[in-house]
Each structure stands twice: as C-alpha cells, then as structure tokens.
Amino acid sequence: MFSDRQTALRGVHHKTFVFVSSVATSEDKPSGSKKKAKKRWWRRKNKVAPSPEEEECSKEEKRREGPEDQKAKMMGAKSVSTRQTRRYKCRGFPNPAQFCYMNSCLQSLLTLEDFVGAFRSQEQVWSSDPEAALIRAFMDIRESHLSPDAHRKIRLLVAFKEAVSVWAPEFQDFDQKDAHEFLTSVLDQMRSLCPQLQAAAASEGRIYSCPVEDHLVFKMQKTKTCKGCGAVSITEEEFTNLSLDLIPGGGTVEEMLRCYLKETELDYNCECGATTSCQRLSFVNLPKVLMLHLKRFRFTPSFQLQKVHDPVDLFGDLVVSSNQGGGCLSLVSTISHVSYTAECGHYICDGVDVNVAQEDPTDRWFTYNDEEVTETTGKAVCDERKNVSYILFYKRHD
Ligand SMILES: [Zn+2]
C-alpha cells in the first residue's frame, strides 16, 4: 500500500521522483546510517577525506557491486541497506590457525565503544611508550576493523597474539585456547600498564586513566561472620569479571548471580574457638560494563575436562543491586562456545550494532563467526545462545 503522498507523487516528472527517493532514504534508514550520512556530509562540507578503512571498505563494495546492486542504487532506499550490508561484512577477522577464541574476544571488546574510545582519546600517552605494545596492537586492529584486506588483518592479529604472549606464553602456540582465560589475561595486562602510563603522562603534564579500570573493574565486598562470637570481618576485592556456576536444568543470569551472592558456610578458625563462619558477597559498585563468565567447563573426579550444557535463560536486561544502589544493565555482546565436547569446539561472538541506539526497535546485532559476519537481533541471540553462551557483556544504563 502506498501512502497518499506517495500515490500523489508517483508517475510525475523526474525532478519530483528524485524528491520522493530522497524522502525514502532519509526517513526509512536506521539511525546508524543517518549518523554515517551526517558524517559524510560533514566531511564533504569541510573537505575531509574518509578514513582509510572507510575508503577501502567502500572500494571493496564497488568491486563487488553487481547489476542488482546498480538497480538497488537506483531505488534509493534499498541501496542504503545494500551498502550497510557490505560495510558490516568487512568487519570479520580471518582465522588462519585456531584464532576463533581471540577473534571472538576482540569482537566483543570492539563492541564496547566507550571502552575503545577511552583508549583512542589517550593515544598520545600509549603510542610512544615501548611497554604499551599490547594497547597499540589492539588499537591497530580497531583501526583496521572495517578493512576488507584479510592479509593485513592476519598480520595484525598475529602481532596482537605475540604482544599478549610476552607476559602470557601459554598463548604463543597456534592451538585452541580458552576465550575466558585469554580475555582476562588481555585485560589484566592492559591494566598492569596503568602505573607506568600514568607516570609517563604525568611527566608530560597529562593524566592517564586506565580504560579497563574505568569501564570493567568493580569491587566486591566479602563479609565473614563467626558462628561462635558473631565477630564480623569485611574485606574488599577487585574484579574484571565474575565466574558463575550454571544452574542444573537451567536458570536465568539473575538467578545465577543470586546463587553467587548467597550466604555460604565455611571453615574458619576464630579466636573464640569456633571453626565455622558465614560468608556473604555483595557488589560494592557496578562497573560500566559487567562481564560475566559462565562456567561451562569442569573437571570430572578423574580430571577429565567436561562441558556443561545446562541452558541459561538470556534476557536483554539485567538488574543488579550493589551497596551503592541498584542498576539496570543491557546485554551488548556474548561469546559462545559451539560444540558438544570440551576438547574441540569453536568460538563465535554476537554484538550489538553500536550505531543503533539502545531503544531502537530494529534491535540490530551482528554475529561474528571469524571472517563471516551476519546480521541478527538481540532477541535471536537470547533465544539461540541458551546452551552455548560462555561470556556475557552487560552495559550499565547511565
Ligand atoms: Zn568467633
């Protein structure tokens, strides 16, 4: 069905048709492309060239463009979605040798645009520091995210892996690794550079603020109460992520968190002579991005690694309470381990389209399966990753 305005304008002369087409493109496309269009307009107006990656990606688009694309281009609105399709397809990472665990971790981190932006805005501090090779390697990958050049991406991925392996030699070979161990190692290493970068920044009259600490680190409080005398001891510990036990038979992430935080009894020798105490955990504060690791691997009594397939009911929103008040968070990325056994398997990542606003009804996400990138929705991710989700990233609402 056509609207009255469209019916009235159909079949009229060329100039008017162009007007209809421009209405369709500016009204129908999602906000992400609006942002890009605005950016292109700004560049034209200010005579700024597109970034090399954007340029390269659009060249690749043109190379692949067939007669159908030409026709789509004539249709105005349709060409916008065709262009978007091509653009996100450039975002994949090749997998020459069991890189899927690293590729998935990188895609998830790149979905955290504020975290990445915090590195970008402090480039002057880390770009010249000889110790900050890991951050440079990460940001090089960020800069080539949209590049269709697979060879260049492989070089950058190998360089990143080598940078990680300097302090974590277990990632040096080309075997399959655990994505959670890799990710925590990457974040810990980025964080460990903080004192040095802060000192380097201070010597030049600048301030360096660690993006890992600002976005992912949070504090947990451990309250121990002696069962005999009631003496209370409180300690605090910092985390970049929590490892949660799955609920046998299935459960929600909120239920898993409740289990993690619930009071437990433990052996503890108190001065009063009592040998047991109660321990309770609570969030002191909530991070901007909460990373949750679901314990899908466990050792059997005979030390065989086993995969746990219990489903996790995923929802877009998560409510978490902390000592500083509650917070609402939204799922923005997942890393999944797709396989039946623990020994072999493949990692994939799902991530929200950062160009689409949180309330946008399109709910546009991408599935990153190494070099293959496909469009999906947050709802589909929640439905399809129940049995395979391994690491979840939740972004706190401001
Ligand atoms: Zn006691």
Image (cartoon, rainbow, N blue to C red):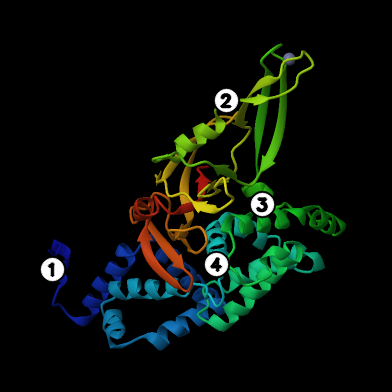
Gap between marks 1 and 4 measured at Cα: 51 Å
- State which tag comes first along the sequence, 1 or 4: 1
Q: Answer whether residue 199 is visible to the viewer in this image.
A: yes
Q: Quadrant of the N terminus?
A: bottom left
At x 55% / y 64%, what residue is drawn? 101
Above/below status of 171 relative to 378: below
Gap between marks 4 and 2 measured at Cα: 38 Å
Q: Which residue is mark 1?
A: 8
**SS assignment at label 1:** helix
Q: Which residue is mark 4?
A: 103
Task: Please indicate whether residue 47 sits to the left or right of residue 36 in the image.
Answer: right
Gap between marks 3 and 4 measured at Cα: 19 Å
- State which tag comes first along the sequence, 1 or 3: 1
Q: Which residue is mark 3?
A: 212
- State which tag comes first along the sequence, 4 or 2: 4
- Type of the residue with mark 4: Asn
Q: Quadrant of ligand 1?
A: top right
Where is residue 94? Give x, y as percent. Answer: 52, 76
Of tags 1 and 3, the one toward the viewer is 3
Labels 2 and 3 touching (C-beta < 8 A): no
